[in-house]
Image (spheres, rainbow, N blue to C red):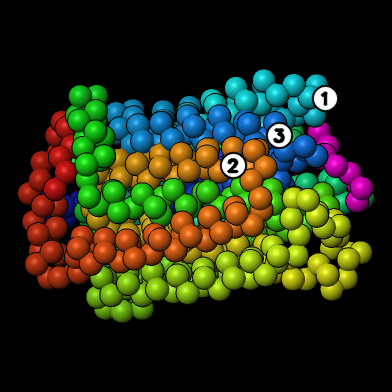
Protein backbone atom coordinates (compact mmCIF):
# COMPACT_ATOMS: atom_id res chain seq x y z
CA UNK A 1 0.00 0.00 0.00
CA UNK A 2 1.36 3.42 -0.93
CA UNK A 3 1.27 6.57 1.19
CA UNK A 4 -0.10 9.98 0.41
CA UNK A 5 2.50 12.01 -1.42
CA UNK A 6 4.61 8.94 -2.27
CA UNK A 7 5.26 6.93 -5.40
CA UNK A 8 6.37 3.31 -5.63
CA UNK A 9 9.56 2.73 -7.60
CA UNK A 10 10.92 -0.79 -7.74
CA UNK A 11 9.08 -1.72 -4.56
CA UNK A 12 10.52 1.24 -2.64
CA UNK A 13 8.30 4.15 -1.66
CA UNK A 14 9.88 7.45 -2.62
CA UNK A 15 8.46 10.45 -0.71
CA UNK A 16 7.65 13.52 -2.77
CA UNK A 17 7.30 16.30 -0.21
CA UNK A 18 8.38 17.19 3.31
CA UNK A 19 4.86 18.50 3.88
CA UNK A 20 3.08 15.22 3.11
CA UNK A 21 0.89 13.96 5.95
CA UNK A 22 3.08 10.93 6.73
CA UNK A 23 6.38 12.85 6.81
CA UNK A 24 8.39 13.22 10.03
CA UNK A 25 8.18 17.01 9.70
CA UNK A 26 4.37 17.08 9.66
CA UNK A 27 4.03 14.45 12.39
CA UNK A 28 6.52 16.18 14.72
CA UNK A 29 4.73 19.47 14.03
CA UNK A 30 1.39 17.85 14.89
CA UNK A 31 2.64 16.47 18.21
CA UNK A 32 4.03 19.96 18.83
CA UNK A 33 0.54 21.40 18.32
CA UNK A 34 -0.96 18.79 20.64
CA UNK A 35 1.55 19.76 23.32
CA UNK A 36 0.96 23.44 22.52
CA UNK A 37 -2.67 22.98 23.56
CA UNK A 38 -2.29 20.61 26.52
CA UNK A 39 1.01 20.72 28.45
CA UNK A 40 1.70 24.16 26.94
CA UNK A 41 -1.39 25.55 28.65
CA UNK A 42 -0.62 23.54 31.77
CA UNK A 43 2.81 25.19 31.86
CA UNK A 44 1.22 28.62 31.64
CA UNK A 45 -1.12 27.72 34.50
CA UNK A 46 1.73 26.39 36.65
CA UNK A 47 4.03 29.25 35.71
CA UNK A 48 1.78 31.79 37.42
CA UNK A 49 2.73 30.17 40.73
CA UNK A 50 0.19 28.42 42.93
CA UNK A 51 -1.97 27.55 39.91
CA UNK A 52 -3.10 31.19 39.80
CA UNK A 53 -4.18 31.17 43.46
CA UNK A 54 -2.96 33.40 46.28
CA UNK A 55 -2.15 30.36 48.46
CA UNK A 56 0.06 27.83 46.65
CA UNK A 57 -0.76 24.97 49.06
CA UNK A 58 -3.51 23.40 46.93
CA UNK A 59 -1.40 23.70 43.79
CA UNK A 60 1.68 22.28 45.53
CA UNK A 61 -0.27 19.27 46.84
CA UNK A 62 -1.95 18.71 43.46
CA UNK A 63 1.46 18.93 41.78
CA UNK A 64 2.91 16.40 44.23
CA UNK A 65 0.09 13.98 43.41
CA UNK A 66 0.57 14.71 39.71
CA UNK A 67 4.30 14.05 39.64
CA UNK A 68 4.05 10.99 41.87
CA UNK A 69 1.76 9.18 39.42
CA UNK A 70 3.69 10.75 36.53
CA UNK A 71 6.87 9.11 37.86
CA UNK A 72 5.23 5.68 37.68
CA UNK A 73 3.39 6.09 34.39
CA UNK A 74 6.28 7.95 32.79
CA UNK A 75 8.36 4.80 33.14
CA UNK A 76 5.45 2.57 32.08
CA UNK A 77 4.32 4.99 29.38
CA UNK A 78 6.79 3.85 26.75
CA UNK A 79 5.54 0.28 27.00
CA UNK A 80 1.91 1.35 26.98
CA UNK A 81 2.56 3.51 23.91
CA UNK A 82 4.19 0.57 22.10
CA UNK A 83 1.13 -1.59 22.84
CA UNK A 84 -1.72 0.87 22.20
CA UNK A 85 -0.15 3.04 19.50
CA UNK A 86 -0.14 6.85 19.41
CA UNK A 87 -3.80 7.75 18.84
CA UNK A 88 -5.42 5.87 21.71
CA UNK A 89 -2.52 6.67 24.04
CA UNK A 90 -2.52 10.40 23.28
CA UNK A 91 -6.31 10.81 23.21
CA UNK A 92 -6.73 9.35 26.69
CA UNK A 93 -3.69 11.26 27.95
CA UNK A 94 -4.75 14.69 26.68
CA UNK A 95 -8.24 14.47 28.19
CA UNK A 96 -6.73 14.49 31.69
CA UNK A 97 -5.41 18.03 31.15
CA UNK A 98 -8.95 19.37 30.71
CA UNK A 99 -9.99 17.81 34.03
CA UNK A 100 -7.03 19.36 35.84
CA UNK A 101 -7.76 22.90 34.65
CA UNK A 102 -11.41 22.36 35.57
CA UNK A 103 -10.41 21.43 39.12
CA UNK A 104 -8.93 24.89 39.65
CA UNK A 105 -12.06 26.49 38.25
CA UNK A 106 -13.90 24.55 40.96
CA UNK A 107 -11.33 25.60 43.57
CA UNK A 108 -11.84 29.24 42.64
CA UNK A 109 -15.35 28.96 44.13
CA UNK A 110 -15.20 26.27 46.82
CA UNK A 111 -11.61 26.26 48.12
CA UNK A 112 -11.64 22.46 48.55
CA UNK A 113 -8.30 20.83 47.76
CA UNK A 114 -9.57 17.27 47.23
CA UNK A 115 -10.75 17.71 43.63
CA UNK A 116 -7.51 19.43 42.59
CA UNK A 117 -5.38 16.71 44.22
CA UNK A 118 -7.34 13.86 42.61
CA UNK A 119 -7.28 15.65 39.24
CA UNK A 120 -3.54 16.11 39.67
CA UNK A 121 -3.06 12.38 40.27
CA UNK A 122 -5.12 11.54 37.17
CA UNK A 123 -3.19 14.08 35.13
CA UNK A 124 0.03 12.39 36.23
CA UNK A 125 -1.16 9.20 34.56
CA UNK A 126 -2.07 11.07 31.39
CA UNK A 127 1.11 13.12 31.34
CA UNK A 128 3.22 9.98 31.68
CA UNK A 129 1.55 8.51 28.60
CA UNK A 130 1.66 11.76 26.63
CA UNK A 131 5.33 12.52 27.18
CA UNK A 132 6.47 8.96 26.54
CA UNK A 133 4.61 9.05 23.22
CA UNK A 134 5.81 12.55 22.41
CA UNK A 135 9.40 11.61 23.14
CA UNK A 136 9.22 8.55 20.92
CA UNK A 137 7.77 10.59 18.06
CA UNK A 138 10.22 13.47 18.42
CA UNK A 139 13.36 11.32 18.67
CA UNK A 140 12.56 8.38 16.35
CA UNK A 141 10.59 9.89 13.45
CA UNK A 142 13.33 12.30 12.22
CA UNK A 143 16.48 11.18 10.35
CA UNK A 144 19.45 10.47 12.63
CA UNK A 145 21.46 13.53 11.55
CA UNK A 146 18.64 16.04 12.09
CA UNK A 147 17.26 15.09 15.49
CA UNK A 148 18.40 18.35 17.08
CA UNK A 149 16.56 20.34 14.42
CA UNK A 150 13.33 18.41 14.90
CA UNK A 151 13.62 18.70 18.69
CA UNK A 152 13.87 22.47 18.31
CA UNK A 153 10.87 22.50 15.92
CA UNK A 154 8.81 20.61 18.48
CA UNK A 155 10.04 22.71 21.39
CA UNK A 156 9.24 25.96 19.61
CA UNK A 157 5.67 24.93 18.73
CA UNK A 158 5.08 23.44 22.17
CA UNK A 159 6.33 26.51 24.03
CA UNK A 160 4.26 28.83 21.89
CA UNK A 161 1.46 27.30 23.97
CA UNK A 162 3.09 28.71 27.07
CA UNK A 163 3.39 32.09 25.35
CA UNK A 164 -0.31 32.16 24.38
CA UNK A 165 -1.20 30.66 27.74
CA UNK A 166 0.69 33.46 29.47
CA UNK A 167 -1.24 36.04 27.47
CA UNK A 168 -4.57 34.62 28.68
CA UNK A 169 -4.15 35.57 32.37
CA UNK A 170 -2.28 38.73 31.41
CA UNK A 171 -5.10 40.05 29.22
CA UNK A 172 -8.00 38.81 31.36
CA UNK A 173 -6.46 40.18 34.57
CA UNK A 174 -4.81 43.29 33.11
CA UNK A 175 -7.05 45.72 34.99
CA UNK A 176 -6.83 43.76 38.26
CA UNK A 177 -3.40 44.94 39.45
CA UNK A 178 -4.32 44.15 43.07
CA UNK A 179 -5.97 40.77 42.33
CA UNK A 180 -4.66 37.72 44.17
CA UNK A 181 -6.29 34.88 42.18
CA UNK A 182 -7.12 34.66 38.48
CA UNK A 183 -10.74 34.88 37.30
CA UNK A 184 -12.94 32.06 35.96
CA UNK A 185 -12.43 33.07 32.32
CA UNK A 186 -8.72 32.30 32.63
CA UNK A 187 -9.35 28.67 33.58
CA UNK A 188 -12.09 28.32 30.95
CA UNK A 189 -9.68 29.61 28.30
CA UNK A 190 -7.15 26.97 29.29
CA UNK A 191 -9.82 24.25 29.11
CA UNK A 192 -10.86 25.25 25.57
CA UNK A 193 -7.29 24.97 24.29
CA UNK A 194 -6.79 21.63 26.05
CA UNK A 195 -9.96 20.24 24.47
CA UNK A 196 -8.72 21.22 21.01
CA UNK A 197 -5.41 19.47 21.71
CA UNK A 198 -7.23 16.31 22.78
CA UNK A 199 -9.06 16.14 19.46
CA UNK A 200 -5.93 16.99 17.48
CA UNK A 201 -4.14 13.95 18.91
CA UNK A 202 -6.24 11.77 16.60
CA UNK A 203 -4.18 13.10 13.66
CA UNK A 204 -0.95 11.43 14.82
CA UNK A 205 0.14 8.45 12.71
CA UNK A 206 1.75 5.27 14.12
CA UNK A 207 5.49 4.96 13.40
CA UNK A 208 4.97 2.13 10.91
CA UNK A 209 3.12 4.57 8.61
CA UNK A 210 5.65 7.40 8.80
CA UNK A 211 8.13 7.57 5.92
CA UNK A 212 11.29 9.66 6.05
CA UNK A 213 12.53 11.69 3.09
CA UNK A 214 14.98 8.93 2.13
CA UNK A 215 12.15 6.39 1.92
CA UNK A 216 12.96 4.59 5.19
CA UNK A 217 10.28 3.84 7.77
CA UNK A 218 10.55 4.63 11.47
CA UNK A 219 9.79 0.99 12.29
CA UNK A 220 8.51 -2.16 10.63
CA UNK A 221 6.86 -3.35 13.83
CA UNK A 222 3.12 -2.81 14.11
CA UNK A 223 2.42 -3.63 17.76
CA UNK A 224 4.38 -4.85 20.74
CA UNK A 225 3.25 -7.26 23.46
CA UNK A 226 2.67 -6.72 27.19
CA UNK A 227 5.19 -9.41 28.16
CA UNK A 228 7.83 -7.83 25.93
CA UNK A 229 7.32 -4.38 27.39
CA UNK A 230 7.40 -5.59 31.00
CA UNK A 231 10.76 -7.26 30.42
CA UNK A 232 12.25 -4.35 28.45
CA UNK A 233 11.12 -1.72 30.97
CA UNK A 234 12.56 -3.75 33.86
CA UNK A 235 15.90 -3.90 32.01
CA UNK A 236 16.10 -0.08 32.00
CA UNK A 237 16.89 0.01 35.73
CA UNK A 238 20.11 -1.93 35.08
CA UNK A 239 20.97 -0.14 31.84
CA UNK A 240 24.14 1.90 32.44
CA UNK A 241 23.10 4.46 29.83
CA UNK A 242 19.91 5.22 31.73
CA UNK A 243 21.73 5.33 35.07
CA UNK A 244 24.02 8.08 33.73
CA UNK A 245 20.94 10.10 32.72
CA UNK A 246 19.31 9.97 36.18
CA UNK A 247 20.84 13.21 37.61
CA UNK A 248 19.90 15.17 34.47
CA UNK A 249 16.40 13.70 34.53
CA UNK A 250 15.88 14.38 38.24
CA UNK A 251 17.02 18.00 37.98
CA UNK A 252 15.22 18.95 34.76
CA UNK A 253 11.82 19.60 36.39
CA UNK A 254 13.06 20.02 39.95
CA UNK A 255 13.84 23.69 39.35
CA UNK A 256 10.29 24.58 38.22
CA UNK A 257 9.06 24.83 41.81
CA UNK A 258 11.71 27.36 42.70
CA UNK A 259 11.31 29.38 39.51
CA UNK A 260 7.50 29.49 39.47
CA UNK A 261 6.69 29.79 43.18
CA UNK A 262 9.73 31.47 44.68
CA UNK A 263 10.71 33.85 41.90
CA UNK A 264 7.68 34.58 39.71
CA UNK A 265 4.96 34.31 42.38
CA UNK A 266 6.95 35.85 45.23
CA UNK A 267 8.41 38.79 43.30
CA UNK A 268 5.62 39.85 40.90
CA UNK A 269 1.92 40.70 41.04
CA UNK A 270 -0.70 38.64 39.19
CA UNK A 271 -0.87 40.43 35.85
CA UNK A 272 2.91 40.75 35.65
CA UNK A 273 3.32 37.01 36.28
CA UNK A 274 1.23 36.40 33.15
CA UNK A 275 3.45 38.77 31.17
CA UNK A 276 6.57 37.13 32.57
CA UNK A 277 5.36 33.75 31.39
CA UNK A 278 4.93 35.05 27.84
CA UNK A 279 8.65 35.80 27.82
CA UNK A 280 9.66 32.72 29.87
CA UNK A 281 8.13 30.35 27.32
CA UNK A 282 9.23 32.58 24.46
CA UNK A 283 12.80 32.26 25.73
CA UNK A 284 12.35 28.49 25.55
CA UNK A 285 11.74 28.77 21.82
CA UNK A 286 14.99 30.71 21.36
CA UNK A 287 16.97 28.34 23.55
CA UNK A 288 15.78 25.21 21.77
CA UNK A 289 16.56 26.66 18.32
CA UNK A 290 20.06 27.70 19.41
CA UNK A 291 21.03 24.41 21.04
CA UNK A 292 19.37 22.44 18.23
CA UNK A 293 21.66 24.16 15.72
CA UNK A 294 24.74 23.37 17.80
CA UNK A 295 23.75 19.71 18.21
CA UNK A 296 23.15 19.20 14.47
CA UNK A 297 25.45 21.58 12.58
CA UNK A 298 28.35 22.84 14.73
CA UNK A 299 30.79 20.02 13.84
CA UNK A 300 30.94 17.15 11.36
CA UNK A 301 31.35 14.57 14.13
CA UNK A 302 28.12 13.77 15.97
CA UNK A 303 30.04 12.96 19.16
CA UNK A 304 31.88 16.29 18.99
CA UNK A 305 28.56 18.09 18.52
CA UNK A 306 27.31 16.38 21.67
CA UNK A 307 30.35 17.56 23.64
CA UNK A 308 29.91 21.09 22.26
CA UNK A 309 26.24 21.22 23.22
CA UNK A 310 26.87 20.02 26.77
CA UNK A 311 29.71 22.54 27.17
CA UNK A 312 27.58 25.46 25.97
CA UNK A 313 24.66 24.54 28.23
CA UNK A 314 26.96 24.13 31.24
CA UNK A 315 28.52 27.57 30.73
CA UNK A 316 25.20 29.33 30.12
CA UNK A 317 23.57 27.46 33.01
CA UNK A 318 26.31 28.38 35.47
CA UNK A 319 26.07 32.06 34.50
CA UNK A 320 22.29 32.07 34.97
CA UNK A 321 22.43 30.36 38.37
CA UNK A 322 25.04 32.92 39.49
CA UNK A 323 22.54 35.62 38.54
CA UNK A 324 19.86 33.74 40.45
CA UNK A 325 22.06 33.66 43.55
CA UNK A 326 22.67 37.40 43.37
CA UNK A 327 18.92 37.98 43.12
CA UNK A 328 18.06 35.50 45.88
CA UNK A 329 20.35 37.19 48.39
CA UNK A 330 18.01 40.22 48.31
CA UNK A 331 15.05 38.42 49.93
CA UNK A 332 14.02 35.34 51.91
CA UNK A 333 10.91 33.61 53.30
CA UNK A 334 11.10 35.82 56.36
CA UNK A 335 11.76 38.98 54.38
CA UNK A 336 9.57 38.91 51.27
CA UNK A 337 10.02 41.61 48.63
CA UNK A 338 7.35 44.10 47.60
CA UNK A 339 5.44 42.82 44.56
CA UNK A 340 6.79 44.19 41.29
CA UNK A 341 4.54 45.47 38.49
CA UNK A 342 5.73 45.83 34.91
CA UNK A 343 4.18 49.33 34.66
CA UNK A 344 4.61 50.78 38.12
CA UNK A 345 7.94 49.43 39.39
CA UNK A 346 10.24 51.13 36.92
CA UNK A 347 13.84 49.93 36.75
CA UNK A 348 13.35 47.61 39.76
CA UNK A 349 11.39 45.32 37.46
CA UNK A 350 14.19 44.85 34.90
CA UNK A 351 16.68 42.65 36.77
CA UNK A 352 14.25 40.02 38.11
CA UNK A 353 12.46 39.98 34.75
CA UNK A 354 15.68 39.25 32.84
CA UNK A 355 16.52 36.52 35.35
CA UNK A 356 13.14 34.82 34.91
CA UNK A 357 13.51 35.08 31.12
CA UNK A 358 16.95 33.46 31.42
CA UNK A 359 15.51 30.60 33.48
CA UNK A 360 13.23 29.81 30.54
CA UNK A 361 16.19 29.93 28.16
CA UNK A 362 18.15 27.49 30.32
CA UNK A 363 15.22 25.08 30.71
CA UNK A 364 14.83 24.57 26.97
CA UNK A 365 18.55 24.36 26.31
CA UNK A 366 19.02 21.78 29.06
CA UNK A 367 16.08 19.58 28.13
CA UNK A 368 16.70 19.79 24.36
CA UNK A 369 20.30 18.76 25.00
CA UNK A 370 19.21 15.72 27.06
CA UNK A 371 16.61 14.72 24.44
CA UNK A 372 19.30 14.90 21.75
CA UNK A 373 21.56 12.61 23.78
CA UNK A 374 18.71 10.13 24.30
CA UNK A 375 17.85 10.28 20.59
CA UNK A 376 21.48 9.54 19.70
CA UNK A 377 21.39 6.28 21.68
CA UNK A 378 19.00 4.53 19.26
CA UNK A 379 16.89 5.11 16.16
CA UNK A 380 13.87 2.84 16.53
CA UNK A 381 10.61 4.04 18.05
CA UNK A 382 10.18 1.10 20.44
CA UNK A 383 13.53 1.55 22.20
CA UNK A 384 13.32 5.35 22.30
CA UNK A 385 9.78 5.33 23.73
CA UNK A 386 11.13 3.29 26.67
CA UNK A 387 14.20 5.52 27.08
CA UNK A 388 12.12 8.69 27.06
CA UNK A 389 9.57 7.12 29.40
CA UNK A 390 12.36 6.32 31.87
CA UNK A 391 13.67 9.88 31.58
CA UNK A 392 10.22 11.38 32.17
CA UNK A 393 9.54 9.03 35.08
CA UNK A 394 12.71 10.01 36.93
CA UNK A 395 12.12 13.65 36.02
CA UNK A 396 8.65 13.53 37.53
CA UNK A 397 9.85 11.82 40.71
CA UNK A 398 12.21 14.75 41.18
CA UNK A 399 9.41 17.23 40.58
CA UNK A 400 7.16 15.49 43.13
CA UNK A 401 9.88 15.89 45.75
CA UNK A 402 10.50 19.52 44.76
CA UNK A 403 6.87 20.55 45.26
CA UNK A 404 6.87 19.05 48.77
CA UNK A 405 10.19 20.69 49.56
CA UNK A 406 8.51 24.04 48.91
CA UNK A 407 5.34 23.04 50.80
CA UNK A 408 7.50 22.33 53.86
CA UNK A 409 8.92 25.86 53.64
CA UNK A 410 12.53 25.00 52.89
CA UNK A 411 14.45 28.25 52.48
CA UNK A 412 14.59 29.85 49.05
CA UNK A 413 18.40 29.92 49.13
CA UNK A 414 18.63 26.19 49.91
CA UNK A 415 16.32 25.42 47.00
CA UNK A 416 18.41 27.51 44.62
CA UNK A 417 21.69 25.89 45.68
CA UNK A 418 20.13 22.42 45.38
CA UNK A 419 18.91 23.12 41.84
CA UNK A 420 22.25 24.54 40.79
CA UNK A 421 24.11 21.56 42.23
CA UNK A 422 21.86 18.96 40.57
CA UNK A 423 22.23 20.45 37.10
CA UNK A 424 25.99 20.86 37.54
CA UNK A 425 26.47 17.20 38.53
CA UNK A 426 24.63 16.05 35.41
CA UNK A 427 27.03 17.64 32.88
CA UNK A 428 30.11 15.40 33.34
CA UNK A 429 27.90 12.30 33.42
CA UNK A 430 26.34 13.28 30.08
CA UNK A 431 29.85 13.79 28.68
CA UNK A 432 30.73 10.23 29.73
CA UNK A 433 27.51 8.95 28.12
CA UNK A 434 28.25 10.68 24.82
CA UNK A 435 31.85 9.45 24.91
CA UNK A 436 30.91 5.81 25.47
CA UNK A 437 27.53 5.41 23.77
CA UNK A 438 27.12 7.94 20.95
CA UNK A 439 28.65 6.86 17.65
CA UNK A 440 29.57 9.07 14.72
CA UNK A 441 27.68 8.62 11.48
CA UNK A 442 29.69 6.80 8.85
CA UNK A 443 29.22 5.35 5.39
CA UNK A 444 29.07 1.91 6.96
CA UNK A 445 26.22 2.97 9.21
CA UNK A 446 24.33 4.47 6.30
CA UNK A 447 24.85 1.35 4.18
CA UNK A 448 23.58 -0.82 7.03
CA UNK A 449 20.47 1.34 7.40
CA UNK A 450 19.86 1.15 3.65
CA UNK A 451 20.18 -2.63 3.64
CA UNK A 452 17.79 -2.95 6.59
CA UNK A 453 15.29 -0.65 4.88
CA UNK A 454 15.34 -2.69 1.67
CA UNK A 455 15.47 -6.16 3.20
CA UNK A 456 13.45 -5.95 6.44
CA UNK A 457 9.96 -7.48 6.13
CA UNK A 458 6.95 -5.92 7.80
CA UNK A 459 5.83 -8.09 10.70
CA UNK A 460 4.01 -7.92 13.99
CA UNK A 461 6.02 -8.99 16.96
CA UNK A 462 8.04 -7.88 19.96
CA UNK A 463 10.65 -5.18 19.63
CA UNK A 464 14.27 -5.98 20.27
CA UNK A 465 16.86 -3.51 21.43
CA UNK A 466 20.12 -3.49 19.52
Q: Which residue is mark 1?
A: 109
The stretch drawn in magenta includes residue 389: no
What secondary structure is found at the residue carrying circle 2? helix
Vertical position of residue 225 compared to residue 338: above or below: above
Q: Tell me residue 445's x, y (percent).
A: 13, 64
Q: Main secondary structure of the magenta part?
A: loop
Q: Which residue is mark 3?
A: 57
Q: Tell me residue 456's x, y (percent).
A: 10, 45
Comparing 55 with 455, the one in front is 55
Is 352 left, or right, of 136 in this rendering? Answer: right
The earlier-in-sequence mark between 1 and 2 is: 1
Location of the N terminus by quadrant is top left
Q: Which residue is mark 2?
A: 405
Comparing 456 with 76, the one in front is 76
Q: CA distance from mark 3 to mark 1?
A: 16 Å
What secondary structure is found at the residue carrying circle 3? helix
Vertical position of residue 1 compared to residue 155: above or below: above
Which of the 4 quarters of the picture holds residue 436? bottom left
Residue at position x 34%, y 41% from top?
390
Q: Tell me residue 51's x, y (percent).
A: 71, 39
The stretch drawn in magenta includes residue 180: yes
What secondary structure is found at the residue carrying circle 1? helix
Amino acid sequence: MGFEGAEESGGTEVPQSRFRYNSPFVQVSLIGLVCFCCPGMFNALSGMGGGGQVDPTASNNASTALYTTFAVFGILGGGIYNILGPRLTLLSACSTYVLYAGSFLYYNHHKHQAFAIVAGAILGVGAGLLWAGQGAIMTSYPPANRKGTYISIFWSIFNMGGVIGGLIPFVLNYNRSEAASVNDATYIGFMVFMTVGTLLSLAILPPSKVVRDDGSKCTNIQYSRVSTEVVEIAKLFGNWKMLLIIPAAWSSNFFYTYQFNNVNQVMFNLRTRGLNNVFYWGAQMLGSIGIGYIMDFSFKSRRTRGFAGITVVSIVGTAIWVGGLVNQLTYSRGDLPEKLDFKDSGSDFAGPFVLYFSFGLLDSMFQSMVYWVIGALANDSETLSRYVGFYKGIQSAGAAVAWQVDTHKVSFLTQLVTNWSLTTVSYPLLVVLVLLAVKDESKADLEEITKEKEAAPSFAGPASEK
